[in-house]
Amino acid sequence: MIAQLTGKVLEKQAESIILDVSGVGYIVQLTTASMTSQPEVGAQTTIYTSLHVREDSWQLFGFATLEEKTLFEKLIGISGIGPKLAMSILSSYSLDDFKKAVANEDAEFLTSVPRLGSKNARRIILELKDKLVLSTDFSPTHKQAQEALRSLGYTNTEINTALASCSSSNGGNDAEELVREALRNLANG
């Protein structure tokens, strides 16, 4: 398996680059986040890779971070999720947004990815819920605020976005204060 490549960027395309490694040009398909972090043509770069072999083709999928590669490999390990769909998922969301959606069991948020139906979204949640490490765990206060906002008719996506931008979301002891701040964030767009 090819786990990592270091070389000179020969060409940048919409979703891939051609990387020259000791005179051999590799086409590496990248996520949107990884693509934007690549240097200009002619510069050196290192990409973490995952090689996918099928009967009719060999494909290299590349990632700027090891965390992104690890999540890709977890996704393709789920029945019904192939490498192209996994790349589409990782290109649609930041890693933190994806992890929060899984932690909150927000299948509606995940189905905004083209070709990802609700059945596969629920399967992703079921398979990954206990395997992903969130950068910040949700406190009981945070969960109370989520439930309060949900009872007011807000969608999970709106709730997560509003709570993520709250200054009191990490360590605040008052759910009411957190809800008030989230409502201000929702009102301000």
Image: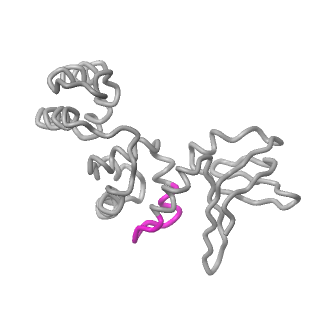
Is residue 81 rendered to the left or right of residue 50?
Answer: left
**Residue at 25% in and 41% down:** 156
Magenta extent: 76-87
Quick one: 37 or 71, which is closer to the camera? 71
Quick one: 183 or 64, which is closer to the camera? 64
- Quadrant of the image containing the C terminus: top left
Question: Could you tell me residue 68's position as x and y percent?
Answer: 53, 50
Is residue 135 positioned above or below 130 on the image? above
Question: Could you tell me residue 3's position as x and y percent?
Answer: 66, 61
| Image-quadrant location for residue 100 | top left
| Image-quadrant location for residue 135 | top left
| Residue 23 magenta | no
Is residue 189 rendered to the left or right of residue 60?
Answer: left
**Residue at 62% in and 74% down:** 53
Q: Residue furthest left?
A: 151
Question: Could you tell me residue 88's position as x and y percent?
Answer: 49, 54
| Residue 85 magenta | yes
Quick one: 27 or 128, which is closer to the camera? 128
Quick one: 66 or 102, which is closer to the camera? 66
**Residue at 22% in and 39% down:** 155
The chosen color scheme is one colour
Question: Could you tell me residue 75's position as x and y percent?
Answer: 45, 61
**Residue at 29% in and 36% down:** 160
- Quadrant of the image containing the N terminus: bottom right
Is residue 163 rendered to the left or right of residue 36?
Answer: left
